[in-house]
Image (cartoon, rainbow, N blue to C red):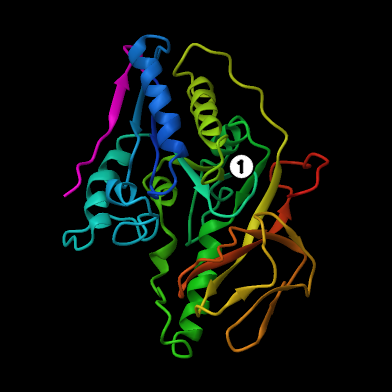
């Protein structure tokens, strides 16, 4: 059994309780490197915690990290919940991690992505009293998102997943060879769990997995978060003008021969009717609306997310004049 490790610092003065995660997916190491750098500065005396508490988890999934792959036995960032009957390694992580999350108020989860693209932040939903993800701390998340040092925010994760589950249920019999997950809780990861227990949370996608700049993005986000939450004596970073997109569709890969029409990058724009990919039976997948490709994964396993589609959103106000890429 791989050991679990967290490093916590508590100031004398009260304040916000922050937790920062790295390597929830084992091949996403930028967060680990950014966290390790922050820990080294605190231990060396170059960075002092003036209030509150910060807990760092450099490697959240040690099995996946040791094997240099996304998962151990399964994806930790899906169906995250404690269980009395752990079977997979990620179940044991959940039984350790979920109580640790519950000790904190704010989560910053550091990730990276497969295809080329620019860093962005995943926010939770706007305040609502719905059944999928009721929430009342949107303003806190939005304020922090604007200070992480990136120029794009994305929301709509869990509602998009609910629609994806319904689609899987509809085509499960047609594609028995695919490993289809039909559990509505499939979309619940670290940030969704944190919101469900009363906290606020952001996922920062720091860049492509092997981008040498990604660890610096992670480190800067940690420093900006500490400053914004008043955990260190540093000026609150100025909020960035941000482009905001909302996820609207998730499309699964259903067969190893499903193929993209081109080498998509995250946030490539598409027009309505544009060919995105072709199924193994020759049917063409086209864009149902003008929007953007997010997280295209040409190596996705059958029954898992292949790509997402997003629309422009005015949630954070008018976006800066820029071309999405």
Residue 237 colored in magenta in the image: no
Residue at horizontal 43 percent and vertical 32 percent from the top: 33
Residue 185 position in % (x across, y down): 39, 64
| Magenta highlight range | 1-14
> What kind of element bears circle 1?
loop
Residue 26 position in % (x across, y down): 37, 49
**In front here: 166 or 65?**
65
Q: Is residue 40 above or below residue 207?
A: above
Residue 166 position in % (x across, y down): 50, 77
| Drawn side of residue 316 relative to residue 147, left or right | right
**In front here: 143 or 277?**
277
Residue 227 position in % (x across, y down): 52, 20
Count up the numbered dots. 1
Residue at horizontal 58 percent and vertical 58 percent from the top: 295
| Drawn side of residue 302 relative to residue 13, left or right | right
Q: Is residue 106 visible?
A: no
Residue at horizontal 59 percent and vertical 36 percent from the top: 145
Residue at horizontal 40 percent and vertical 50 percent from the top: 25
Q: Please, what is the dominant secondary structure of the magenta stretch?
A: loop
Q: Is residue 35 visible?
A: yes
Q: Residue furthest top?
A: 45
Q: Residue furthest right?
A: 321
Q: Is residue 115 above or below residue 208?
A: below
Please tell me how crowded label 1 is: few (under 14), some (14-19), or many (20+) other residues with Cα within 10 Å: many
Q: Which residue is mark 1?
A: 119
Q: Is residue 236 above or below residue 299?
A: above
């Amino acid at each position: 059994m791989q050991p679990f490790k967290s490093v916590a610092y508590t100031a004398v003065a009260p304040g916000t309780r922050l937790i920062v995660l790295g390597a929830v997916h084992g091949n996403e190491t930028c967060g680990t490197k950014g966290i390790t750098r922050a820990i080294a500065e605190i231990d060396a005396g170059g960075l002092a915690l003036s209030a509150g508490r910060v807990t760092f988890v450099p490697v959240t999934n040690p099995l996946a990290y040791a094997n240099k792959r996304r998962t151990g036995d399964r994806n930790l960032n899906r169906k995250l919940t404690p269980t009395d009957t752990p079977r997979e390694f990620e179940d044991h992580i959940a039984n350790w991690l979920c109580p640790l999350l519950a000790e904190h108020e704010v989560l910053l989860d550091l990730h990276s992505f497969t295809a080329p693209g620019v860093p962005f932040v995943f926010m939770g939903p706007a305040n609502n009293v719905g059944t999928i993800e009721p929430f009342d701390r949107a303003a806190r998340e939005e304020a922090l998102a604007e200070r992480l040092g990136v120029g794009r925010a994305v929301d709509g994760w869990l509602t998009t997943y609910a629609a994806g589950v319904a689609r899987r249920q509809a085509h499960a019999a047609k594609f028995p060879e695919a490993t289809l997950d039909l559990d509505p809780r499939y979309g619940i990861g670290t940030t969704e769990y944190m919101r469900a227990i009363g906290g606020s949370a952001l996922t920062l996608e720091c860049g492509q997995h092997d981008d040498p700049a990604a660890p610096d993005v992670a480190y800067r986000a940690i420093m900006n978060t500490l400053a914004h939450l008043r955990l260190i004596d540093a000026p609150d970073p100025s909020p960035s003008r941000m482009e905001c997109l909302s996820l609207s569709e998730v499309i699964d890969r259903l067969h190893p021969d499903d193929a993209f029409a081109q080498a998509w990058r995250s946030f490539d724009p598409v027009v309505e009717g544009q060919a995105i990919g072709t199924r193994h039976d020759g049917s063409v997948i086209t864009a149902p609306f003008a929007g953007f490709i997010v997280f295209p994964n040409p190596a996705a396993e059958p029954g898992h997310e292949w790509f997402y589609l997003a629309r422009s959103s005015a949630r954070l106000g008018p976006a800066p004049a820029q071309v999405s890429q």
